[in-house]
Image (tube, rainbow, N blue to C red):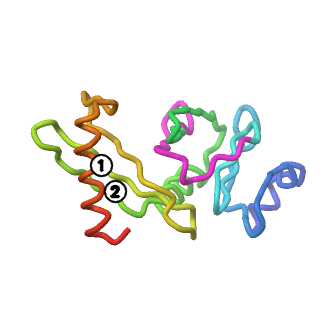
């Protein structure tokens, strides 16, 4: 593919890739190159962010904004985005096995999300409570866990 020839060899060699991991696309940013592989997004500082740890990613006039499941927000200002935003969106979406919103009795609801590593097994579930709900409330948490068990049984995941 011709676009790989434009990614400087020193950048390609500096990526801490896994066996079988390959570059899909890249974009040049203000601080260096941002590279999307089939398994992860490499930020300009060289940080590897696996797709299954990305909660949200979006592109706007400020650049590529990535929110990880740990709550970290990363912003990369790109001089030319190329196919990077679309590739990241597709790869992140491919890690989602289940994404289901469940109403909780009289309290709003919770989104139940199962994620997996590309080509791998389900890693686990994330509970995302509606705005205004306290995820540390033991009663609310118990209701969410009960809803999760029901979804797991019904979907076989």
Q: Is residue 59 magenta?
A: yes
Left or right position of 144 against 126: left
> At 64% from the left edge and 60% from the top edge, which residue is drawn?
39
Q: Residues within 10 Å of mark 2 (few under 14, many from 20)?
A: few
**Residue 147, horizontal then vertical, whole percent:** 24, 53
> At 32% from the left edge and 33% from the top edge, which residue is drawn?
135
Quarter of the image for residue 20 reads: bottom right
Quarter of the image for residue 150 reads: bottom left
Residue segment shown in magenta: 47-65
Main secondary structure along the magenta-highlighted residues: strand
For the N terminus, give its image quadrant.
bottom right
Q: Which residue is mark 1?
A: 145
Left or right position of 50 against 93: right
Q: Are marks 2 and 1 in contact (CB under 8 Å)?
A: no
Of the two numbered discs 2 and 1 in the rendering, the one whose residue sits closer to the viewer: 1
Near-viewer residue (63 or 93): 93
* 131 is higher (above) or lower (below) than 116: above
Near-viewer residue (104 or 78): 104
Near-viewer residue (111 or 45): 111
| Element assignment for label 2 | strand
> At 48% from the left edge and 36% from the top edge, which residue is drawn?
60
**Residue 40, horizontal then vertical, whole percent:** 64, 54
| Element assignment for label 1 | helix
**Residue 21, horizontal then vertical, whole percent:** 72, 65
Q: Is residue 153 magenta?
A: no
User: What numbered label is drawn on residue 99?
Assistant: 2
Left or right position of 29 against 138: right
């Amino acid at each position: 593919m011709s676009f790989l020839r434009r990614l400087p060899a020193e950048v390609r060699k500096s990526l801490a890739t896994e066996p079988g991991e390959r570059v899909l696309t890249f974009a040049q940013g203000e601080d260096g190159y941002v590279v999307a592989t089939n398994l992860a997004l490499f930020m300009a500082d060289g940080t590897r962010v696996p797709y299954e740890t990305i909660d949200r990613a979006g592109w706007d006039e400020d650049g590529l904004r990535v929110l990880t499941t740990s709550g970290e927000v990363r912003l990369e200002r790109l001089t030319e985005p190329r196919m990077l935003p679309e590739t990241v969106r597709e790869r992140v979406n491919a890690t989602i096995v289940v994404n289901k919103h469940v109403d909780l009795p009289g309290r709003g609801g919770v989104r139940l999300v199962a994620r997996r590593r590309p080509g791998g097994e389900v890693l686990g579930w994330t509970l995302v409570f509606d705005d205004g709900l306290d995820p540390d409330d033991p009663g609310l948490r118990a209701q969410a866990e009960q809803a999760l068990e029901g979804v797991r049984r019904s979907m076989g995941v």
